[in-house]
Amino acid sequence: MRKTGSGFVASIMTGLMLMQTPLGLHAQEVREVLPDLTELPAMRVEGAAHSVQLAVARAGDRLVSVGEQGIILLSDDDGQSWSQASDVPVSVTLTDVEFTSETEGWAVGHFGTVLRTETAGDQWVRVMTGQDVVATIGEAVQSLSETEPGAAAIKRNASYLTGDEPILDIHFSAAGEGWLLGAYGIALHSLDGGQSWASAFSATGNPNSYHLYQYVPSPGNEALIVGERGLVSRSLGNADVFESLPIDYEGTFFGGVASGSRQFLLFGLRGNVWIGDGSHWARLQTGSQASFSAGVATPMGIVLGDVTGRLFVKPRDSEHIRELAQASDAAITDLILSSGGGLVMSTARGLKRLELDNTEFK
């Protein structure tokens, strides 16, 4: 089951890192003062299961979660207990994880980090750095014709990238098409299962280089990319170019869930939840001002998690959203269905598991 990513908490952690930068130091000076977390293997941590975790995915019968300090956690009992991966080559915050088979998976994070595993999450290798990301984008945008709409702005924004930017989402389709999305409009596209990546910096309908938080697929051929400042871009069919869609909302969308072959539910800041087909959007009343940070489709409806640890539900065949449970004492960052039909949540205080009563969805 496709998870929704964790853009809200990841963006907060990025801001906190910037706030913790020693005053008066430029980026190069900071690199000289602080250890290079992209070269420092993740340490074994006592109580790792209670660390900040930002995303969770399924690798066959195993669950894999990623989060702060390069901590990757594994569960072979449907989320009841967790152990730390044995070999992670970085200590950066990891923001998302995706598996393309029972053993092959990907994790992404700060400083443009891209990791790959062939051992169901136990051992990882770094396959891309932030400098690789910047070089790929920079080379591609230089070939843009000045007559193309927005070319000047795209080139200018690409020139600002440093390689320190976080990647916030990774998605692969069953056919092996992959997307990497991140801060300041970072976007890479793969057609060969991640063996190679090309720039999509100018292809996401995002000339202002807003942060891109999630790629949202649907059961049909349509897909959305959502992000900062109410950004919603759509791709139809197998096109790898997205068009920006109008929506009467200027806040950030952190993610979305397909609620039909051509209908999407999007969630974001200050209790905003919108539903639509790309041409028409309607805001759903949630009765909450807390930001929604995670969501997952279940057989009974769509479950949303927020930054206060609450779960909300939009039952199937209903346009109403209501509170389901206070499931955590910390922000919920990602949701996935357990094999038993319950929910496994990554949160700002580790992993939690919740059984679902189907009557709650009626």
Image (spheres, rainbow, N blue to C red):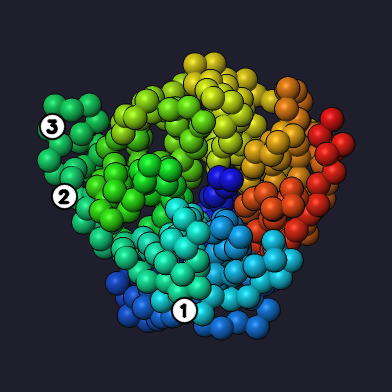
Amino acid type at circle 1 is Asp
Q: Mark 3 points at which residue?
A: 146
C-beta proximity under 8 Å, tags 3 and 2: no
How crowded is the residue under tag 3: few (<14 C-alpha within 10 Å), some, or many (20+)? few
- Disc 3 versus disc 1: nearer the observer: 1
Amino acid type at circle 3 is Glu
Front in this rendered view, residue 255 or 147? 255
Amino acid type at circle 2 is Glu
**x, y (%) of residue 362?**
84, 30
- Disc 2 versus disc 1: nearer the observer: 1
Q: In this view, does 39 lie above or below 355?
A: below
- In this rendering, position of residue 44 left or right of residue 292: left
Q: Name the residue under label 2.
A: 139
- In this rendering, position of residue 249 left or right of residue 306: left
- The residue depicted at 44 percent of the width and 47 percent of the height is 171
Identify the element where label 1 is drawn: loop
Between the residue at mark 3 and the residue at mark 2, the CA separation in whole angstroms equals 15 Å
Residue lying furthest top in this view? 280
**x, y (%) of residue 198?**
24, 47
The numbered disc on residue 87 is 1
**Which numbered disc flags the more N-terminal residue, 3 or 1?**
1
